[in-house]
Image: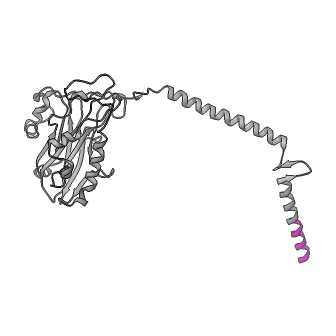
Amino acid sequence: MADKADKENEVDEIQRKETWRDFLYNSNKGEVLGRTGMSWCKIGVFYAIFYACLVGWFAGLLHAFDASLDKTAPTYYGENSLTQANPALGMRPMPRFDSTMIRFAQGKKSSYRPYVDHLEAFIKTYENVSDAVDCSSGERPKEGKACKIDIREHLTNLGCTRDTDYGYLAGTPCVVLKMNKLYDFTPNPYATFADLEKDLDKETGERLGYQSYADGNTGVSCDGQNALDKQNIDLIEFSPSTGLDAIYFPYRNQVGYRSPVVVAKLSNVQKRVTIQFNCRLWAMNIDNSDGKRKSGTMHFELYIN
């Protein structure tokens, strides 16, 4: 019985091998993988036409989509966009995208080097912009042109240079605050200090120096997040002190355009304590309230050892 079973298994194995050989190539029928040459030719032509039509269909859709886009302006902007015509405020240096904390030891270069290097790299993006024009005279640039922004000049005005490691060497660091690009947005500055008082009490406004914002510029301020933080801040200097000049607006995808900036020097702050800063943009059509969106504001922390 065992010999008979072995012989049956051997016969089955031979049949399986012959079946696979016939599937790969059957000389009697002239088939390869179960198809004749003519059958392979027909199915090859079919799939070639099918995929060519499929590729052409998607290519046509992509072309139609691309043709419907404006090359200079976004499809949705202003009140129709997700930002709802309210700009955001950014801060540099910020070597870690997931942290707004500036922490270093005064006089210890290795502790603040990442901040200095990141700030230097950011400054270079504003330098040697061949398409930008000099607007120091206060005149608006021609249509399609953007004003050149000299961040180093603002830093130098506050005594923050590369030689002083932008103030980090002496424990008086400089940070750059920039209004992020928002297509076709033009701030509506406060015309008078009385207008500003509607959104800010007079005592706070005078302490932060908002009187200078009545010159048609967009104000930028920084203060402590809460009462304790404010007690740990003695002096913050700004350059330019008048905020963001109106000549930088609106942004309409001009060649060489860079976001307008204000440099803040944290001249006299308490050491060895974490201070939370809240910086804001000030204009009549900018919402800088502490809502969920946090538009028009920038929050960062500072600890100097």
Question: Can you say whether 187 is above or below 126 in the image?
Answer: above
Point 19% across, 56% down: residue: 303
* Residue lying furthest top: 143
- Up-down: is 280 above or below 85? below
- Residue 10 point in image, percent of width and height: 88, 69
**How is the model colour-coded?**
one colour
Number of numbered discs on residues: 0
Please, which residue is most extreme toward the bottom here? 2
Look at the image and tell me whether residue 41 can be seen: yes
Magenta-drawn stretch contains 11: yes
Residue 283 location in percent, x, y? Answer: 20, 31
Is residue 128 located in the magenta-colored stretch of the structure? no
| Horizontal relation, residue 232 to residue 18: left or right | left
Q: Quadrant of the C terminus?
A: bottom left
Location of residue 42 by image quarter: top right
In front of the other: 239 or 287: 239
In this rendering, position of residue 252 left or right of residue 281: right
* Image position of 195 with respect to 177: above or below: above
Residue depicted at x 14% and y 44%: 158
Q: Please provide the residue range marked out in magenta.
A: 1-12
Residue 187 in view in this figure: no
- State the image quarter where residue 87 is shown: top left
| The N terminus: image quadrant | bottom right
| Residue 240 place in picture, x, y as percent | 16, 36
Q: Principal SS element in the magenta part?
A: helix
Residue 50 x/y as whole percent = 70, 35
Q: Nearer the viewer, residue 13 or 5?
A: 13
